[in-house]
Image (cartoon, coloured by chain):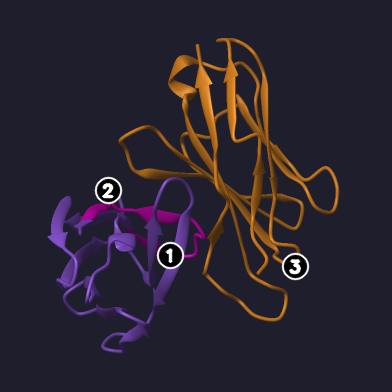
Chain colours: A purple, B orange
Amino acid sequence: EDKVVQSPLSLVVHEGDTVTLNCSYEVTNFRSLLWYKQEKKAPTFLFMLTSSGIEKKSGRLSSILDKKELFSILNITATQTGDSAVYLCAVFSGSARQLTFGSGTQLTVLP
Amino acid sequence: EPEVTQTPSHQVTQMGQEVILRCVPISNHLYFYWYRQILGQKVEFLVSFYNNEISEKSEIFDDQFSVERPDGSNFTLKIRSTKLEDSAMYFCASSDPPDRISYEQYFGPGTRLTVT
């Protein structure tokens, strides 16, 4: 059974801090890993990572994948209160188009 | 920017009743999905739909569930006889514009289903 594990489960920081969120996976025939930000409702797409070692970047957010060690990290620099959300990691594997999600990391950024 | 929309945002129903959740995927996408998230739990895959038929489904998607694309824009999830444990947030998603294969799934805002 495919497994996606995120850590930490929750994190409280102050504005301006840098955070690193972790996602490890055990899946058969890995295809890609996706990061989403979930505020009140819909998961909002952030990044998709397919190749190992290539950093994806968008503003203060960046992410990298290590296919050898089976994990990905999501970094957020200079955090703002608007970054407060649950960050979800999800993996595609095999020929399926279904995403397997982790439990998420609840990030709270205090002013 | 195109987005996935869902209606209603909240549905309350009595156990045993049928519900239909509606979604309008991004217009040029070819794959459509339903996921659910029980309060405090992970987002779970229910079903994927491509070329007017179910592509894959999970163990959760039993005979009580069905999906349909009744016209060119809507994608629906029907639960025939709701149970208390069907209470959850149901997300619709879509992916794959016709010009390229893409695994990026875009989610709608969800329908919160409460079964009493």
Chain under callout 1:
A
Which quadrant of the figure has residue B43?
top left
Dots 2 and 1: beta carbons under 8 Å? no
In the image, taking residue A42 as reference, residue B43 lies left or right, namely left
Dots 3 and 2: beta carbons under 8 Å? no
Chain under callout 3:
B
Q: Amino acid at mark 2?
A: Ser
Which quadrant of the figure has residue A80?
bottom left
Element assignment for label 1: loop
Q: Amino acid at mark 3?
A: Asn
Task: For marks 3 and 1, give the CA distance.
Answer: 25 Å
- In which quadrant is the N terminus of chain B drawn? bottom right
User: At which x and y percent is residue A20?
Assistant: 17, 70
Q: Amino acid at mark 1?
A: Gly
Element assignment for label 3: loop
Residue under circle 3?
A: B28
Is residue A8 among what the camera can see?
Answer: no
Which residue occupies the foreground of this view, A8 or A4? Answer: A8
What's the magenta region?
A: A88-108
Q: Which mark is residue A103?
A: 2
Q: Is residue B61 above or below residue B109?
A: above
Q: Are marks 3 and 2 on the same chain?
A: no
